[in-house]
Amino acid sequence: YALAVEMTLEQIRAARPQVVIDLLPAEPTVTERLRAESLWRDAFPIGQAPERIYAIHDPALGVPGPRIADQIRRLRRWLAPEPKSALP
């Protein structure tokens, strides 16, 4: 069985996300990835864009299977990155 959540742009704006992960249907070129990230930034009022925007293609993120633990770790790095050390 599949579960899909659809949100309008207005609902996404109202949620004021800190992170947006845009799952693209095909592997993007650098230009396509930058364009997708830019579209997300432009979709929010000035100063309210998410702190981090990731436009990626990874079929494994949408398909449960043996690599799900790896995908969860990957999502964690995007959602809660390690703080940068004060030391070089």
Image: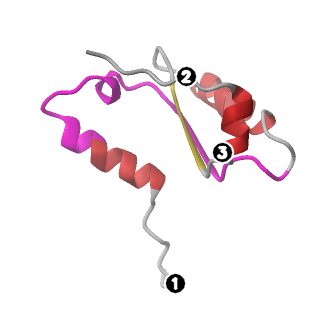
Q: Secondary structure at mark 2?
A: loop
Q: Which residue is mark 3?
A: 15
Q: Which residue is mark 1?
A: 86
Q: CA distance from mark 1 to mark 3?
A: 32 Å
First along the sequence among labels 2 and 1: 2
> Magenta segment range?
47-71
Q: For the N terminus, give its image quadrant.
A: top left
Neighbour tally class for label 1: few under 14, some 14-19, many 20 plus, Cα within 10 Å: few
The numbered dot on residue 37 is none
User: Which residue type carries mark 2?
Assistant: Glu
User: Which residue type carries mark 3?
Assistant: Ala
Q: Is residue 66 magenta?
A: yes
Neighbour tally class for label 3: few under 14, some 14-19, many 20 plus, Cα within 10 Å: few
Residue 61 pos. (x, y %): 33, 30
Q: Which residue is mark 2?
A: 6
Say which residue appears at 61% left-offset and 52% top-offset: 18
Residue 30: quarter of image:
top right
Query: Which residue, as the protein is rendered here, is positioned at the far right?
Result: 46
